[in-house]
Every structure is written in structure tokens, then in C-alpha cells.
Amino acid sequence: MAGRLEPTPVPRRDFLGIFGLVSAGLAICGSMIGMLRLPKPRVTPDASSRFRAGKPDEFPPGSDRILTERSVRVVSTAQGVAAMSMICTHLGCIAGPSEEGFHCPCHGSVFADDGKVIGGPAPRALPWLKVSQAVDGTLVIDTESEVPPATWYMPVLSSLPGDGVSTA
């Protein structure tokens, strides 16, 4: 005999109806929360692939400098200025200077001074990067624009007021 304190069983059809209403309510609440977050961007912009390396007089002929914050090597000769990425073409580790040229510490790839693969698992040479000059005279390197190896950029020295560069 059923007592007054025992709940009455919910029929299956009523249970499915209640479950459907709860599911629809949760879906509507979730979409409302998504719409409220929509005006604020969730993705931050990537850093620009182009950066200013410095004035041409900071790279006199014969200089060889690694810009560690961008993993780029800048070489200056009488032919001009060139940039080479220091990111290993095997798995993206940062190669560092060694006796042979450059050595990747992750898997042992070895590169010559011009970026060619000497040994290790790297599938191709270190890429040379496009070098150009901004209007104010600073050298600009684009890390997403590869150029053929041994591509040199001859900077134009201009005499802008206050920059101390002379064309004479």
C-alpha cells in the first residue's frame, strides 16, 4: 500500500517532455552567453612579420650580428646587407653559433655560415629573409618573405635632417 509520503512515479512521457524543456533552456542560455561575449575579440593579433633592425650605419661592412629577440642573423659586407633566419627547418628550434657555422640544440642539425645543411635531420637550408629600407632610412626585415640565398640589399644612405648620415 502506497503511503502519503512516497512520491508518485513520473510517467516516461512526462519525463522526456521535462528533459526536452530543460535541454532547450540550457541551449538558449548558452547561446545568450555566447552572444554577450561576441563583441569582445578573443583572438589577439600576431606580432608583425616585419620589424626594424636599425640604421644602416649600425651594420658596417664586415659585421655579423644575431638579433636574438627575433632569431635573425644580419650580415653586412661590401655587397650589402642580408638577413638569415636562425629557426631550424627541422622542427623550429633556434640554432646557435658553433665552430662549423650554426648548430640546432634540439636534434643536432648543423648549418654552414651561409645556412646550407651540413648534417642532421634538417630537410633544407636556413632561409634568407627579405631586407628593405623604410622611409626614415632604417633597415626592415620581413620574416615571412624568403629570398634566394646570397641575396644582398644595398642600403640607400640619405641625408635626412638630424640623422647624421651624409651621402658625400
Image (spheres, rainbow, N blue to C red):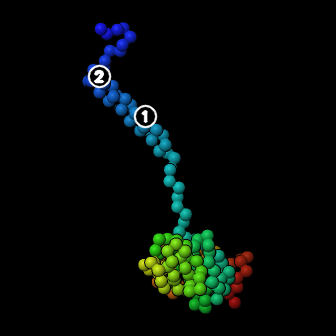
Residue 162 in view (yes/no): yes
Q: Which one is nearer the viewer's eye here, 39 or 163?
A: 39
Q: Position of residue 32 (x, y in %)?
A: 44, 37
Find disc 2 in the rendering and name its residue: 14
* Residue under the image location 29 percent in, 22 percent down: 14
Callout 1: SS:
helix
Q: In terms of image quadrants, where is residue 82?
A: bottom right
Residue 143 in view (yes/no): no
* Residue under the image location 43 percent in, 34 percent down: 29
Mark 1 to mark 2: distance in Å? 23 Å
| Residue at the front extreme of this rendering | 1
Q: Quadrant of the N terminus?
A: top left
In this picture, residue 68 sits left or right of residue 88? right
Amino acid carrying mark 2 in the image: Asp
* Residue under the image location 42 percent in, 37 percent down: 30
* Residue under the image location 38 percent in, 31 percent down: 25
Find disc 1 in the rendering and name its residue: 29
| Residue at the left extreme of this rendering | 13
167 relative to 142, above or below: below
Q: Quadrant of the C terminus?
A: bottom right
Q: Position of residue 105 (x, y in %)?
A: 55, 74
Q: Which one is nearer the viewer's eye here, 147 or 68?
A: 68
Amino acid carrying mark 1 in the image: Cys
In this picture, residue 136 sits left or right of residue 113? right
- Is mark 1 in CB contact (under 8 Å) with mark 2? no
Q: In terms of image quadrants, where is residue 11?
A: top left
Q: Position of residue 119 (x, y in %)?
A: 47, 83
Q: Nearer the viewer, mark 1 or mark 2?
A: 2
Callout 2: SS:
helix
How packed is label 2: few (under 14 Cα within 10 Å), some, or many (20 or more)? Answer: few
Q: Position of residue 16 (x, y in %)?
A: 29, 27
